[in-house]
Image (spheres, rainbow, N blue to C red):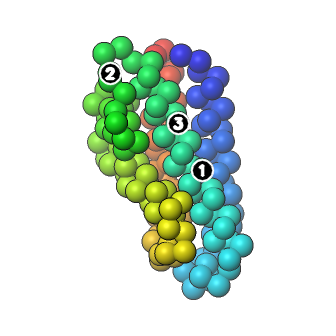
Amino acid sequence: MDRLIVEEKLESLRRCLARIRQKCPPTVNALMDDIDAQDIITLNLTRAVQLCADIAAHLVAEMDDVRLPDSTGGLFDALAKEKVLSDAVARRMRKAVGFRNLAVHQYEEVDWHIVHVICQQHLDDFYKFARAVTDWLDQGR
């Protein structure tokens, strides 16, 4: 496996998360009134989810005896089964994929309350994913 590719994606993920933290207003009402923040946050959240999915696909593709799942969410389940991720992180990443699908395909119907909660309470899920991947790589996998 090309560790450099994974590390570059992890760095891109960190930049997306930093941008979200920087641009997320303190209240949902402020977010609802700021279309620039909405765009920046939505773009970076969808990028963050896609980066995690790309990393997961890269890892799963390199694992012996692990079949590439049929769905993006299944990638995180495969990593949990292989003990790369905890079940809790895998579950949160599957939920993030669901959000990404909604944001990309039905942008006009995005619930900004949910987006604000993600920004305020669930960005750590992405950091936990990154930490788990880094730990796994550091073990020489």
What label sits on residue 54 in the rendered view? Answer: 3
Q: At 63% across and 71% down in the image, what residue appears?
A: 38
Q: At 58% across and 28% down in the image, what residue appears?
A: 6
- Residue 133: tell me if it is visible: no
How far, Cα to Cα, is label 1 from label 2? 26 Å
How far, Cα to Cα, is label 2 from label 3? 16 Å
Q: Quadrant of residue 44?
A: bottom right
Where residue 80 appears, as percent x and y from the top left, is 32, 34
How far, Cα to Cα, is label 3 from label 1? 10 Å
Judge by depth and name the residue closer to the eye, 125 or 103: 103
Q: At 62% across and 64% down in the image, what residue appears?
A: 41
Amino acid type at image mark 1: Arg
Q: Earlier in the sequence, mark 3 or mark 1?
A: 1
Q: Label 1: few (<14), some or many (≥20) within 10 Å?
A: some
The secondary element bearing badge 3 is classed as: helix
Q: Label 3: few (<14), some or many (≥20) within 10 Å?
A: some
Q: Label 2: few (<14), some or many (≥20) within 10 Å?
A: few
Direction from residue 130 to residue 23 in the image, left or right: right
For disc 2, the marked residue is 66
What label sits on residue 47 in the rendered view? Answer: 1
Amino acid type at image mark 2: Val
Q: Is residue 4 above or below residue 33?
A: above
Tags 2 and 3 touching, CB below 8 Å: no
Q: Is residue 139 above or below residue 135?
A: above
Amino acid type at image mark 3: Asp
- Residue 88: tell me if it is visible: yes
Tags 3 and 1 touching, CB below 8 Å: no
Judge by depth and name the residue closer to the eye, 98 or 37: 98
Judge by depth and name the residue closer to the eye, 30 or 36: 36
